[in-house]
Amino acid sequence: MRRQAPPLSANAGGPPLRVTPIEESTTSTRAATPAAPQVVAGPGPGPVTTTRPAAAAAAEVTIPHDCEPATLAAKRGAGAAKPGRLTGIDIARCVAVFAMMSVHILPAVGPNGAMSLPFVLAAGKSAALFAVVAGVGVAFSSGREKRPRGRRWVAAAASMVVRAVLIATIGLLLGEVVPFDTAAVILAYYGILFVLAIPLLSLSVRSLAVLGLVSAVVIPVLSHLVRPELGTPALINPTFGELADPGALLSQLSLTGIYPAVPWVAYICAGMAVGRSRLASRGVVLRITVIGVVLAVAASATSWLLLNPLGGWKHLEAVALPNMTLVEYTDLVVWGADGTVPTTSPWWLALLTPHSTTPLDLLYTTGIALTVVGVALLLGRVAGRVLAPLAAAGSMPLTLYSFHLLMLASPFMPASPTATFVLQAVVLVTFANLWSRRCKRGPLEHALSFVTDHVRTLIMGARRTPTPDHRTPDHPLAPAGAR
């Protein structure tokens, strides 16, 4: 959806945001507790007390039910992860949800004809933040600091494929009811993005960081070279009808659409690098924050240098104005693109405007996202209780994102954008906090995890539990020594 507004100075910064991504889930792990003696029935006259080897105890991982009440989870022992870590990621997700809502609902133009503050703060940045925290979720669900190997990698890869298909299906369903001029639905693009993340599951933090930087710089350039052969897709949300031409749909979701998955691998790499890091270390979190600030400042300064002292604006005007009106040109370079920039000149790659998917746009928005994640993790350490209501909303971004889009497409919203924003915010936060009293994940997150956990179990193999535990001495199958 292109926002039209009075022309501004061409180098004025942020254009429109079209949507947001979502992602998903955080799985909790527990440190293994010391093995405790077990009493089992023996063949003789009495029970035999045995102690499991520490290695065997450490090998078992207790995965609570997705909908397990938080009170039960709290009773499982002191080995749980520190709340500040996961709370911080959920706070970052919540920031992305509200930023996305502000761009979809609130006016892009302020009373004085300039960009509104919500648009400046959120346009193009919330989508990047969602993609980065999605990468964090991928790392969390595949072992956090412990990278998957062997059968664990196969199980993680298979569950990722299933998750990608389910999320893309939800996206196509939402595309049927949400018009593109209301919001651009990102979930179908996410399906491709999660599949592209599979080869990255076993990479180290350093490898992910390097690959993310290379992807941000190189892939947009390659896309710039090949897109003239791919054509321009229609500005519509992908639906099941688009499956009739799978090649065109794949091209749109991968390279030519508003959220092109292949260049967005840079976001996933950045998020997975964060998720594989030692987030229990305050120093690591501070480094993530500093790296984010440096990336954002460096990308912004480089764009300014290329477009101003080095004459980029003059080159762009020379190639653009003969083929587009001044309003169209201003709309593109100020308010933002629809996922790609024209391929008529390499100088387009110097732009920093939202959803332009240029190297500098990817680096800048990755830096902003890392900064938000770092600050959120620090806040989660010191103000986790105060921010718990927001963290509850951030724990179910897929559910709230989908609910937001359905409300936005309904005819029952107030006429006032501000009233609509406040109403949706209250409804979503209230729902999230009521639901999270009994369940650790949102409804859609729980459904996805239920399916993907079963896929993992099928590949890894179910663990047997001791049979005497559920039998009374009078049970007909109880061992003779227990009767």
Image (tube, rainbow, N blue to C red):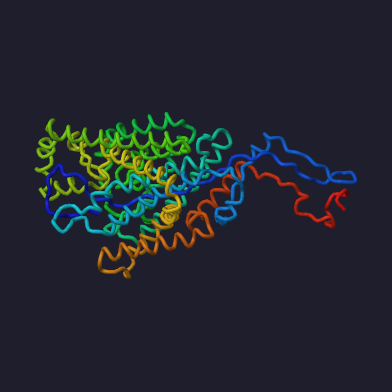
Residue at figure coordinates x 12%, y 46% from the top left: 324
Does any portion of residue 115 appear in the rendered image? yes
Give x and y (percent) for residue 31. Answer: 59, 40
Which one is nearer the viewer's eye here, 282 or 64?
282
Residue drawn at 51 percent across, 60 percent down: 437
Q: Among all residues in the image, which is located at the extreme front?
A: 382
Q: Name the quarter where the N terminus is drawn.
A: bottom left
Residue 67 at x, y = what percent? 55, 56
Left or right for 139, reference 336: right
The number of numbered discs placed on residues in the rendered structure image is 0
Nearer the observer, 72 or 96: 72
Using the rendered image of the protein, determine whether residue 397 is visible from the camera's viewpoint: no
The residue located at (57%, 47%) in the rendering is 455
The picture quadrant where one finds residue 247 is top left
Q: Is residue 135 above or below residue 107?
A: above
Q: Position of residue 461 (x, y in %)?
A: 64, 43
Residue 299 sits above or below residue 256 on the image: above
Judged from this view, the residue extending furthest toward the right is 45
**Residue 231 place in picture, x, y as percent:** 26, 44
Q: Quadrant of the rendered structure where residue 275 is?
A: top left
Query: For residue 294, what is the image quadrant?
Result: top left
Relative to 80, 389 lies left or right: left
Residue 459 shown left or right of residue 116 in the figure:
right
Q: Nearer the viewer, residue 83 or 3?
A: 83
